[in-house]
Amino acid sequence: MATIDLGKIKQVWRGTYNNSTAYVVDDLVSYTDGVVLSTYICVANSTGNAPSTGGTAHASWNFVSKGTSGDLGLVSQNVYTSTGTSTWTKPSGVTKVKVIVTGAGGASSATGGNRIDDIGAAGASGGTAIKVIDVSSISSVTVTVGAGGTAPAADAGDSNSDTTGGSGGTSSFGSHCSATGGGGGKSYTYLTGAGPVSVGHATPGLGSGGDINLQGGHGALPILNYNGAPSLMSGGIGGSSFWGGAGRGAADDNFTSGNNDISGGGSTGTSAGAYGSGGSASCREFKGGDGTHGVVVVENYK
């Protein structure tokens, strides 16, 4: 009597996929592609071929039940803090990103030593743009992080009293969205002829191209001709950004040289503020704060 090979008469559950196992037609496995757990059926004998990559099934496998990312949609995050340009490269399987772009903060103006009764103007903070972008057809994007504005050096004379603080640089995520940096604190000469007080404020940065576009915060106005200058003076606070407040301002106890005298905070380090915040103000002959560098945050989603 002839023998008829019927092969398998039912599917065989083989458990979690193992790259070293030889699978044959009708084997069933579970496999996690990125963060998505799915069930697959083998349609061609296969060894060492993952059932899917980036959500696309291998030719040796078909989906039986395709999972979803659900609450695990956030796969990874990239945080760019180094000024200048760099490149975001799309991780495998990512289809959307949420981008938060913040411009850099502006710096404080200068106050020369002869103006012992003045406090300088603080810098404004950078703006922020927030956007969700479909990156299904995008492989990479150029990222730009703006540099914080530089505060003019202080001196024992008046030469730097007329110097406005440096503006913060623009941050961007390709052409998708961007945020300008905050303006520097206005100089003494500018303010004496500025007219309305509001004109004396440094101009905050502004986000553009985002689903949400935020303006940065204003820095403190200066105090000019502070009658009966106190023995302890400190600079006003720079503008707060989307990420938080500014760094320290300058301080002068007006006693013996040294003591507790300090210059304002830097663009980085422990004395700096949150990403994109404005530099806090100068006082007497002490340098005000630099603006804090911007930041670009990219959240990667399946």
Image: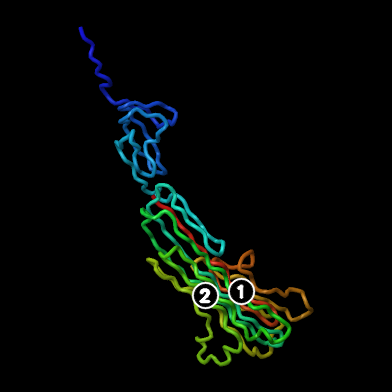
Question: What is the CA distance from the residue labelled 1 to the residue labelled 2?
Answer: 12 Å
Q: Quadrant of the N terminus?
A: top left
Tell whether 243 sits left or right of 288: left
Image coordinates of residue 45 in percent, x first then y, are 34, 27
Q: Characterize the local packing of mark 1: few (<14), some (14-19) or many (20 or more) Cα atoms within 10 angstroms.
A: many
Q: Is residue 135 above or below residue 156?
A: above
Image coordinates of residue 39 in percent, x first then y, are 33, 35
Tell whether 62 sits left or right of 103: left
Snapshot quadrant of residue 96? bottom left
Q: Characterize the local packing of mark 2: few (<14), some (14-19) or many (20 or more) Cα atoms within 10 angstroms.
A: many
Identify the residue at the far top of this view: 1
Snapshot quadrant of residue 250? bottom right
Q: Which mark is residue 182?
A: 2
Q: Nearer the viewer, residue 71 or 144?
A: 144
Q: Is residue 38 above or below residue 219?
A: above
Instruction: Say what secondary structure mark 1 lies in.
Output: loop
